[in-house]
Structure formats: structure tokens, C-alpha cells
Image: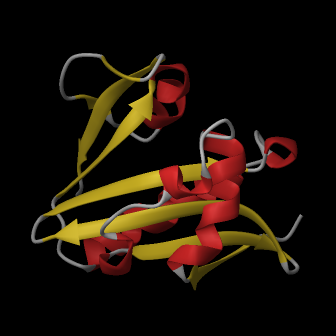
Amino acid sequence: MLITIRAIQPAATYPLRHSVLWPNKPLDYVKIDDDDLGMHFGAFHEEQLLGVISLFVNGEAARFRKFAVAPGSQRQGIGTRLLTHVMEEARQRGARTIACDARQEATGLYYKFGMEPAGPEFYKGSIAYVRMQKVLT
């Protein structure tokens, strides 16, 4: 399957963020106050949006948030493509580190990218999270 990654507007991320990450919450729950300050990327097959990720770079520190891949498209390399893209984008923008708040159940993917826990487990509602971080080379 041919996947292309391209920049998208924040609002284009909301439906997928909502349906994958927080389907039982109102749509506004998946919006970030600083969405207008970030860069947002979509993974597309033809014109179908299959994955989204948002990147925020502040000096030498980058953070990605609201990373979601449609359930029927998971485990097909789409998430890997999105993560690779934002890590390179962060490097090009001068970031020396990149971090995310990862759902505990998804940390395996982040370990594959060389990310390590950078703090204790915490909860958002009933979902366990851990801050993951990596030094960019």
C-alpha cells in the first residue's frame, strides 16, 4: 500500500484523534489549546486519511501528541512512517530531544524507536501513561 505523509490543518486531525483515542469523550476533548502552534501530519492512502500525529517544537525540545492510526490500518507500518517523519522534522527544526506521553499499552512501539521512560507512570482517567523521551542524533 502506497502511503504518503503530508502536512494537514489541525481540524483535519480531530475526527481520527477522537475515534481512536477518546471515542467516549466529546470531540472537543481531543483538541489541544496550542494546536495552532504545532505542525500536523496525516498519513494517506490515495485520499483516505489513515493516521495523524501532531508535532510541537520549542527550541531544542520537541514533543509529539495525539498520535492515532485507524484501527483497520494498524500494524501495517503507518505509525512507523509517521514517527519517522516527525522525528526527522524535529531534527531539521533544531530539536535535540523528542518526547511524548505514551499509553502504557503502546510503549513497545516507542522502545523500537529508541525512546525510554522519563518519569513515573501516570493516569488520564483510567488509562495508564508514561512519558517517553529520546535524544535526537
Q: In terms of depth relative to the viewer, which is nearer, 56 or 35?
A: 35
The picture quadrant where one finds residue 124 is: top left
Q: In this view, does 113 lie above or below 97?
A: above
**Is residue 36 shown left or right of residue 118?**
right
Q: Is residue 136 above or below residue 105?
A: below
**Is residue 89 shown left or right of residue 1?**
left
The residue at the point 47 percent across, 26 percent down is: 107
Quadrant in which the C terminus is drawn? bottom left
The answer to whether residue 79 shows anywhere in this view is no
The picture quadrant where one finds residue 102 is: top left
Q: In this view, does 54 lie above or below 12?
A: above
Q: In terms of depth relative to the viewer, which is nearer, 115 or 130?
A: 130
**Is residue 25 shown left or right of residue 108?**
right
The residue at the point 17 percent across, 75 percent down is: 94
What scheme was used to colour the molecule? secondary structure
Q: Which residue lies furthest to the left in this view?
A: 59
